[in-house]
Image (tube, rainbow, N blue to C red):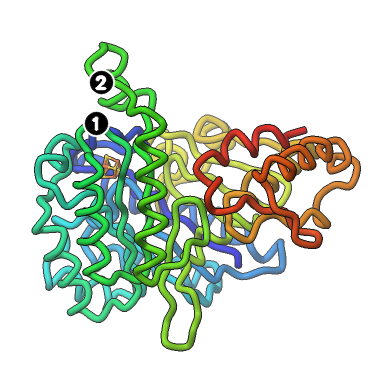
Amino acid sequence: MAGIYVHVPFCSRFCTYCNFYSVKGAGYREQYIQSLESEMEFRKEFFKNKGVSPHTIYFGGGTPSLLPAEVLGRLLHRIISTFNASPEEISIEVNPNDITQEYAESLRKAGFNRVSMGVQSFVDEHLLWMNRRHKAAEGEEAFHNLRAAGFNNISLDLIFGYQGLTDELWQYNLETITSLLPEHISAYQMSIEPGSALGKMYERGEYDLVPDEICKNQYAALQDYLGRSGYAQYEISSFARRNPEGELLKSRHNSSYWTKEPYLGLGPAAHSYDGKTRFWNHPSVAKYCRCYPGKSGIISPENLAKAGGYEELQGRDIFNESVMLGLRTVEGVDTSLLDAGMLREAMSEIRRHIRLGNLIQDGVKIRIPSERLFVSDGIIRDLFV
Ligand code: SF4
């Protein structure tokens, strides 16, 4: 299912652990919106050339909910008409603080039908340490506002594996999140990203890595508790409930990344993929706005080259990426779709990991069993050619 991603690179403050590209302050917002419209126009043949049409649209960030709902709605409708899209899933990432009842209703009216909200924790002390804007009660209130506005597909994010998160508090977070009954839960292990505030604290010796054994136990508790609460795991970090028709309410947009469908990324730092080539906009709103100067401006090849880059994927990149993305999912990777020569090269490692119980072979598919997903990075790396 082909998709479109829009990067909204604004945050009102930076979270301790985050190194995503975003800027503070409202300085570039007006220009950014015009530039996005100009980039859409420039890329309008992207899907036509591939004979597909986009079925998912995802506004991510940054913090898309810092923009007025009318602006987001206008951009959304511009995307739909420019790319002749018939989207089944239109998602937006939001910050709990922005979700008043009125704003939630405006998002629904603007056309969004799925919301992904970073609650991260239900412990105020931890939210403060993460430099999140919201308190635990505000996360819950925002969720209820979304429900009252008619959103019936809500995803909530949690983080585990950081200093101060005891097993008891993790269990509390799991119980609280499931009591809200979101359709989807994403849970990520805290990682130390270069350039983030946490990365700097780590370099200064002010933060220690959490022992692997603790993270592993918290991940196992996550799988176990969500499993018992009616959520099925379908990817390393992703869990979903079923709708009354029995359909698993996965993120269709993210699922397209894992199955390597074409996607177009708009906005600074956004990446695109067309099956052979990956291209991207550099993480700079200033360069982006210079490159796409809005209605009246002309896109010069020189500015275009400065605003982004591209790479042609080689056979080995395609093989390794297919293995990596496929094995992140519970369904695994279909080896019949891989290059036969490279598969032969990887076969001794595949067999070794099957013997170790790290891989399960099911016909032409191989997958990592759920109890080994926590160590999937190492397994996947061993299969690279
Ligand atoms: S986690 Fe989200 S809200 Fe926090 S700094 Fe990163 S992009 Fe902004």
Q: Residue at x 79, y 53 (%)?
A: 335
The answer to whether any part of residue 89 appears in the image is yes
Q: Splitting the image into 4 quarters, where does residue 159 fall?
A: top left
Looking at this view, name the residue that lies furthest to the top. Answer: 204
Residue type at mark 2?
A: Tyr
* Residue in the foreground of this view, choosing between 215 and 293: 215
The reply to whether callout 1 and callout 2 are in contact (CB within 8 Å) is yes
Specify whether 252 is left or right of 296.
right
Q: Position of residue 378 (x, y in %)?
A: 60, 33
Kind of element beneath mark 1 = loop
The answer to whether any part of residue 78 appears in the image is no
**What number is the disc on residue 207?**
2
Q: Which residue is mark 1?
A: 163
Specify whether 7 is left or right of 378.
left
Q: Position of residue 260 (x, y in %)?
A: 65, 55
Q: Position of residue 325 (x, y in %)?
A: 62, 49
Indicate which disc, 1 or 2, sits on the residue closer to the N terminus.
1
258 w.r.t. 188: above or below: below
Residue type at mark 1?
A: Gln
Give the quadrant of the C terminus.
top right
* Residue in the foreground of this view, choosing between 126 and 253: 126
Q: Residue at x 70, y 53 (%)?
A: 360
Q: Residues within 10 Å of mark 1 (few under 14, many from 20)?
A: few
Q: Residue at x 65, y 44 (%)?
A: 358
Specify whether 246 is left or right of 64.
right
Q: Quadrant of ligand 1?
A: top left
